[in-house]
Image: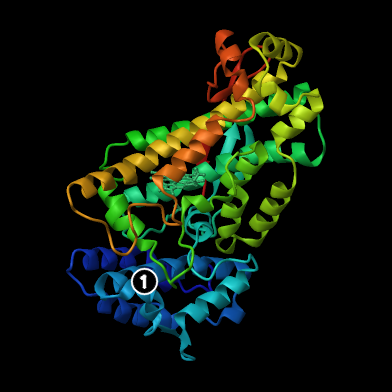
């Protein structure tokens, strides 16, 4: 921990906050105790924001984010009508001798990071900055790497359970794989490259293998035994409830704020009406560079549109082409097979994610509703934290399945080409280069 960020605060968030959160959830301690302990061990020793470097401010955003989420949740759970005025939770909290209100201190920290960070905890703070460096490699080659802002190899969480740490790690691993995919694909839109040349076909195949690895990670997480993964009850009743509002209309943290997933949708195209408006609604909770990159992608053509331009076919006409025409087109442009596989794997990742959302949230909540057990008051389990419903997630998955090259499916299946890709890329001689995703620091 950097010196300006008191070690005591970092240690407190790693060890004491999870203990207190657990004690309050088990009704062995009152939310008032959290406020008293915070005052004594954290708020009184937070440094003046102006003295911090941007990376120190990022560390404190992570730490204060966990503090704010805990205060918000317990207040709303213990106060009648608390969800209608969540900001009241922070009333008693002030920082340092100057008694700066907690949310004003948090906003100053956010400004000081220079990243355009939101005025509450976020996907970036909980996942990307909290978890250490994750690296994606193809054989010996590093394809993408995202550092965290701590160098202690620890993952901060609300209640210190391995399942929560594993969840944050899973999401960060997912993001780094997606970044590797986007770094292969995004330059193709910028440099007006050929989308059917050998070099591009290789990049597309690597991107497909990377997405296959992401899908495998999602499926493996679902298959973990509850003791080492995360039981659905913990996800619904413990973990998600910390995504409480800090102010009435703010945007709580969510996988929906994963910028690399949003970018991939705009690169590959997604036929969902107003999808760009939906994405822009999330902009306040993103970082400056994420907003800029998304803006640029939303304005440009998708890769499938560029591909159709290059091979001189009209997407609408293609939808009505017969099998013979489609077979001839594929024979003439075998790169279409690589692009088809990429789009199909993108859809399969979405399907695996949809399965996770059903397993950990939508199905168990339906069972609770059928049994008359109702919903949680602070964070509803009937939809995602930014309000996405099961139907909306299904719609997104269907739209990804119905991608721009979906009309080739029958022809390619008949020729034994499917959406499968191994989690490795084969060289000309057939040797497999495996994809690996490592937490390095
Ligand atoms: C157990 C694991 C997971 C569960 C239960 C889960 C659940 C959910 C839920 C309920 C939503 C709706 C969110 C909202 O309304 O804001 C959502 C959206 C989303 N999540 Fe996850 N998620 C999981 C893992 C992941 C991972 C690892 C990633 C990134 C690699 C991710 C990326 C996304 C994205 C991009 C969305 C937006 C919807 C979409 O584009 O399909 N999620 N997730």
Residue at image coords 41%, 52%: 384
Q: Which residue is mark 1?
A: 72
Q: Residues within 10 Å of mark 1 (few under 14, many from 20)?
A: many
Residue 69: horizontal and vertical position, in percent?
Answer: 39, 67
Residue at image coords 23%, 44%: 367
In this rendered view, identify the residue nearer to me: 152 or 48: 48
Q: How is the image coloured?
A: rainbow
Residue 1 seen by the camera: no
Ligand 1 closer than 8 Å to label 1 CB: no
Residue 135: horizontal and vertical position, in percent?
Answer: 56, 42
Considering the numbered disc 1 on the image, is that residue within a helix, a strand or a loop?
helix
Query: Where 139 sits versus 269, above or below?
Result: above
The quarter of the picture where residue 16 lies is: bottom left
Residue with the most extreme bottom position:
98
Q: Is residue 241 left or right of residue 215?
A: left
Residue 85 seen by the camera: yes
Residue 259: horizontal and vertical position, in percent?
Answer: 58, 50
Residue 302: horizontal and vertical position, in percent?
Answer: 70, 38
The quarter of the picture where residue 353 lies is: top left
In this rendered view, identify the residue nearer to me: 440 or 213: 213
Q: Is residue 336 left or right of residue 399?
A: right
Q: Is residue 306 left or right of residue 278?
A: right
Query: Where 354 sits versus 195, above or below?
Result: below
Label tally: 1
Residue at image coords 45%, 67%: 65
Q: Is residue 276 left or right of residue 84?
A: right
In this rendered view, identify the residue nearer to me: 401 or 235: 401
């Amino acid at each position: 921990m950097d010196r300006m960020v008191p070690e005591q605060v970092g240690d407190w968030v790693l060890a004491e906050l999870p203990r207190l959160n657990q004690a309050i959830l088990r009704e062995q301690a009152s939310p008032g105790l959290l406020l008293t302990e915070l005052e004594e061990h954290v708020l009184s020793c937070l440094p003046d924001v102006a003295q911090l470097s941007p990376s120190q401010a990022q560390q404190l955003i992570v730490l204060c984010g966990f503090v704010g989420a805990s205060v918000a949740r317990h207040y709303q759970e213990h106060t009648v009508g608390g969800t209608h005025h969540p900001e009241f939770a922070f009333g008693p909290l002030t920082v340092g001798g100057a008694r700066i209100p907690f949310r004003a201190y948090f906003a100053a920290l956010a400004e000081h990071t220079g990243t355009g960070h939101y005025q509450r905890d976020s996907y970036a703070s909980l996942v990307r900055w909290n978890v250490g460096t994750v690296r994606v490699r193809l054989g010996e080659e590093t394809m993408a790497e995202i550092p965290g802002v701590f160098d202690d190899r620890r993952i901060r969480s609300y209640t210190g359970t391995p399942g929560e740490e594993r969840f944050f790690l899973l999401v960060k691993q997912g993001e780094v794989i997606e970044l590797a995919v986007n770094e292969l694909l995004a330059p193709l839109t910028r440099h007006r490259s050929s989308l059917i040349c050998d070099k591009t076909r290789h990049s597309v195949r690597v991107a497909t293998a990377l997405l296959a690895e992401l899908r495998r990670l999602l499926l493996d997480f679902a298959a973990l035994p509850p003791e080492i993964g995360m039981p659905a009850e913990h996800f619904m009743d413990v973990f998600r409830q910390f995504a409480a509002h800090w102010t009435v209309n703010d945007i709580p943290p969510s996988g929906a704020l994963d910028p690399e997933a949003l970018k991939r949708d705009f690169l590959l195209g997604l036929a969902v009406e107003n999808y760009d408006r939906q994405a822009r609604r999330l902009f306040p909770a993103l970082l400056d560079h994420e907003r800029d990159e998304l803006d640029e992608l939303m304005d440009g053509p998708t890769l499938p549109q560029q591909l159709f331009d290059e091979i001189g076919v009209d997407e609408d006409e293609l939808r009505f082409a017969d099998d013979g025409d489609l077979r001839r087109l594929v024979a003439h442009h075998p790169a279409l097979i690589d692009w088809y596989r990429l789009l199909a794997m993108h859809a399969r990742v979405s399907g695996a994610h949809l399965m996770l959302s059903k397993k950990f949230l939508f199905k168990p909540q339906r069972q609770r509703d059928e049994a008359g057990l109702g919903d949680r008051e602070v964070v509803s389990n009937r939809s995602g934290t930014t309000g996405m419903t099961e139907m909306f997630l299904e719609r997104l998955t269907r739209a990804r399945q119905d991608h721009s090259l979906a009309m080739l499916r029958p022809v390619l299946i008949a020729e034994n080409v499917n959406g499968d890709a191994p989690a490795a890329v084969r060289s000309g001689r057939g040797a497999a280069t495996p994809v690996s995703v490592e937490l390095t620091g």
